[in-house]
Amino acid sequence: MSLVGHERSYEASDDLPDCGHYFPRLPERMTHDEYVQGVRSKIVSVARSLLAGELSWTEGSRTISRLRPEAEVGERDKDFDVFVGIDSETDAFPMGAVRDLWDKSALEKLQPEIERMEAWAKTFGTPACHAIIVRWAS
């Protein structure tokens, strides 16, 4: 990695979390500020997907929680604390590829709890999504 002025220059292969198809590709080289802005744009995209019902609250909260340190927000940011809380309360729920490994009857038994928590997360998370969008949307 090279330094550009006093800012760090990032390579496309650096440890930017993979967040699926919701986000545009980032440039191959960027400054630290560009990297942080790209992460924040990704978080806004996830927030919009949550509000549009295109992504489950469990999955979206996990993504936002994982991106939080890279977005350079305070450790006790009230909007991000919401997603950390949702992630914590739903961490036992299988999502993505892990869900495919679960027994179908076990998933059926868990589904009512997942649906209950998704409804709770939507109520709890909607204001935080709006706040993040207002804060960082271009």
Image: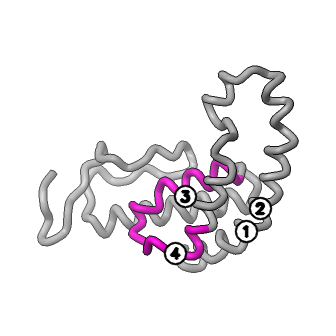
Q: Point out the stretch of residues depicted in magenta.
A: 57-81
Judge whether residue 103 can be spotted in this image: yes
Residue drawn at x 66%, y 58% as measured from the top left: 86
Residue drawn at x 42%, y 65% as measured from the top left: 71
Q: Is residue 135 above or below residue 81?
A: below
Q: CA distance from mark 3 to mark 4?
A: 13 Å
74 in magenta: yes
As helix, strand or loop, the secondary structure at mark 1 comes to helix
Residue drawn at x 12%, y 70% as measured from the top left: 5
Q: Which residue is mark 2?
A: 122
Amino acid on which disc 1 is placed:
Thr
From the image, state whether disc 4 or disc 2 is nearer to you: 4
Amino acid on which disc 4 is placed:
Asp
Numbered circle sitting on residue 126: 1
Which of the pair 35/66 is nearer the observer? 66
Q: Which residue is mark 3?
A: 64
Picture coordinates of residue 4, whole percent (x, y): 14, 65
